[in-house]
Amino acid sequence: MSRTVFITGATSGFGLAATRRFVAAGCRVVATGRRADRLDALVQMLGADKVHPLVFDMRDSAAMDEAIASLPEPFAGIDVLVNNAGLALGTAPANHASLDDWKVMIDTNITGLVTLTHRLLPTLVERRGVIINVSSVAGVYPYPGGNVYGGTKAFVSQFSLNLRSDLHGTGVRVTTIEPGMAETEFTVVRTHGNQAASDALYKDANPMSAEDIAEQIYYVASLPPHLNINRLEIMPVTQSFAGFQVHRG
């Protein structure tokens, strides 16, 4: 599959694993992230002819536009957009949560995603491309402490369905990947650096890996052009659905 793939949040987790997977399949990848050192290491590992780094924060639309405008010709024709960048911050219930954390999640998971998608839509329509938005089971099933994070992912899933409707007839495919428990840096970020909390969450749970999700992202992108998977929800076998909460007294 010799195409150009644009992957946000490529410095860790799903984005890093997806970058490796697409390059292994012969694709060129535009890899974005905030951490220039990690992007540089990715280029060193995979090759400057295969990976082009773009350093910007998803919340900075001006920097995003400037970075995209700087793309060299071999990387400018985007065939696949993987909107992977996103985060959860905090585990407290809504009445004790940080408003600043809420705003960062909204600005990154929603505003940044739609800004980038809007920016690349003309190219994706022209090239009959693929849009893969990484959502979460948190956007489908509520849980204590999920509050704004779950709300942002519900937006991503619904936005994807509406994109699919609006792009009807263009040949552009739109899919939402909705993972459950996967062990990456996700919980370390969510707990503001608490590695012990992350280790405790995943201990003996046999969670999914970043590579598991990257393989599904690649699978969706490599389907024949007449097929569209609307949404793909994935959990480890050890994770299922919680019961309803009941307060007594």
Image: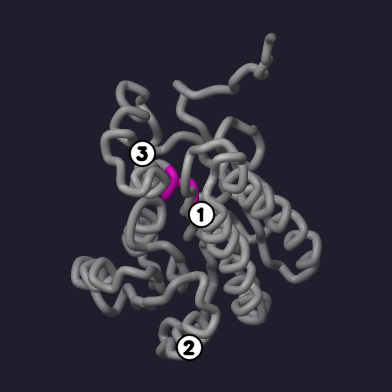
Residue ID at (29%, 70%): 39
The mark that comes first in sequence, 3 or 1, is: 1
Across and down, in percent, residue 26 comes to 36, 66
Mark 1 crowd level (few <14, some 14–19, many ≥20, 10 Å Cα): some
Q: Is 170 displayed left or right of 81 in the figure?
A: right
The mark that comes first in sequence, 1 or 2, is: 2
Kind of residue at disc 1:
Asp
Of badges 1 and 2, nearer the viewer stands 1
Residue identified by numbered label 3: 183
Q: CA distance from mark 3 to mark 1?
A: 21 Å
Residue 214 magenta-highlighted:
yes
Say what secondary structure mark 3 lies in: loop
State how the image is colored: one colour
The mark that comes first in sequence, 2 or 3, is: 2
**Can you say whether 195 is above or below 52 in the image?**
above
What secondary structure characterizes most of the magenta part? helix
Say what secondary structure mark 1 lies in: helix
Where does the magenta region start and end?
A: 213-217
Asked if the residue at tag 2 contacts the one at tag 1, i.e. Cβ–Cβ closer than 8 Å, the answer is: no
Question: Where does the C terminus fall, quadrant-wise?
Answer: top right
Across and down, in percent, residue 231 comes to 65, 45
Q: Is 56 displayed left or right of 247 in the figure?
A: left
Residue 14 magenta-highlighted:
no
Asked if residue 211 can be seen in this view, the reply is no
Across and down, in percent, residue 76 comes to 48, 84
Kind of residue at disc 3:
Glu
Q: CA distance from mark 1 to mark 2?
A: 27 Å
- Residue nearer the viewer, 38 or 123: 38
| Residue 66 - label | 2
Image quadrant where residue 25 sits: bottom left
Residue identified by numbered label 1: 101
Across and down, in percent, residue 107 comes to 57, 64
